[in-house]
Image (tube, rainbow, N blue to C red):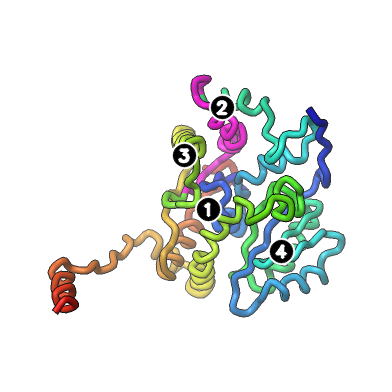
Amino acid sequence: MAKVFIYPATSLILSDLVARFGHQPLGAALSIRERIQTAGVESPPLQITPEDPKRGLKYAAVEVPSGVRGRMAIYGPLIERAEAGVIVTDADFAFGCMGCARTDELILFSLRQRGIPLLELAYPKDEEEGVAFVAAIRRFLAGLKEGGQ
Amino acid sequence: MTEYTPKLAGTVTKYVFVESPATTPADLALRAYEASEGVMIKETCFGLQVTGGPEEVDRLIRQIRAFDPNHIFVKDRGFPPGDPRRCRANLGGARPGYFGHEFEFPILRFISHGLEELERRGEEVLGEATREKRTKPVLDVRRLRELIELEES
């Protein structure tokens, strides 16, 4: 079972398909759950404390806005753990504020920098594309062994 | 600063979505209650949220997924159901995460079709993935002009 980072990190479709084909999807929920279930200082809504932008310094320079560094504190450790990645390139719902947009760019950049196997594809727009989408993911995941090789 | 003590620590929450012509969220809920064995179940309009120990949740999901495997979709959730920081009962309106679900929900039928075809045709379908994507015929400019002129006359 390989750890597969999914982008968008909140995608239901990618999360389901990766788990369905026998691998572990790494999505935003895992990092959020970790924060929600750790005792500390109350910091609603996502329990992102002032410590997180500091942790984000590992992934983004100090001049980078704290919003991006805070977000990278969520995604960065997942990218580090990832042994492979599945990226959907036309995910309009990943659109957000400038912090989200820059974080998204940094996530994709970091994934490509890591040199792990990546699959990039677009959401299906009809049934025929749906078949190709599912088949492409299955073929990619079937090719991953333990450790993402 | 207020101290924060987590509730339901050590549990896992998962969304179960159903997009099926044969199974409704209510059917799914009934079946889930039958197999729950201590897992907390929250019924929703799209399916369920299940919360419990990781093994129990995985077991329950395996059992309920078996009812309609190609039309039931599962993903992790960070918050437990009803968490006041996220629950719309406290915040009002749909919570932000649902926009993502709303975006992906209409695509689920294509994914279901893909899964069914994969099950039915197996390796043959896998071959299709590598084949160059067929381009759809686009509307010719001359034909478009003809249509406009036809419409205007």
Q: Which mark is residue A101?
A: 3
Q: Secondary structure at mark 3?
A: helix
Where A57 sits versus A30, above or below? above
Q: Which mark is residue A66?
A: 2
For the image, the number of numbered tags is 4
Distance of label 4 from label 3 (alpha carbons): 31 Å
Residue A39 found in image quarter:
top right
Q: Dots 4 and 1: beta carbons under 8 Å?
A: no
Q: Nearer the viewer, residue A54 or A147?
A: A54
Q: Chain of mark 2?
A: A
Location of residue B47 (image quadrant): bottom right
Q: Are marks 3 and 1 on the same chain?
A: yes
CB contact under 8 Å: marks 3 and 1: no
**How far apart are the alpha carbons under marks 1 and 2?**
35 Å
Q: Residue at x 70, y 54 (%)?
A: B88
Residue at the spot of label 4? B48
Height in image: A58 above or below B39?
above
Mark 1 lies on a secondary structure that is: helix
Q: Indicate whether B64 appears above or below A94.
A: below
Read off the chain for label 4.
B
Subunit ID for the residue under disc 3? A
Amino acid type at image mark 2: Ser
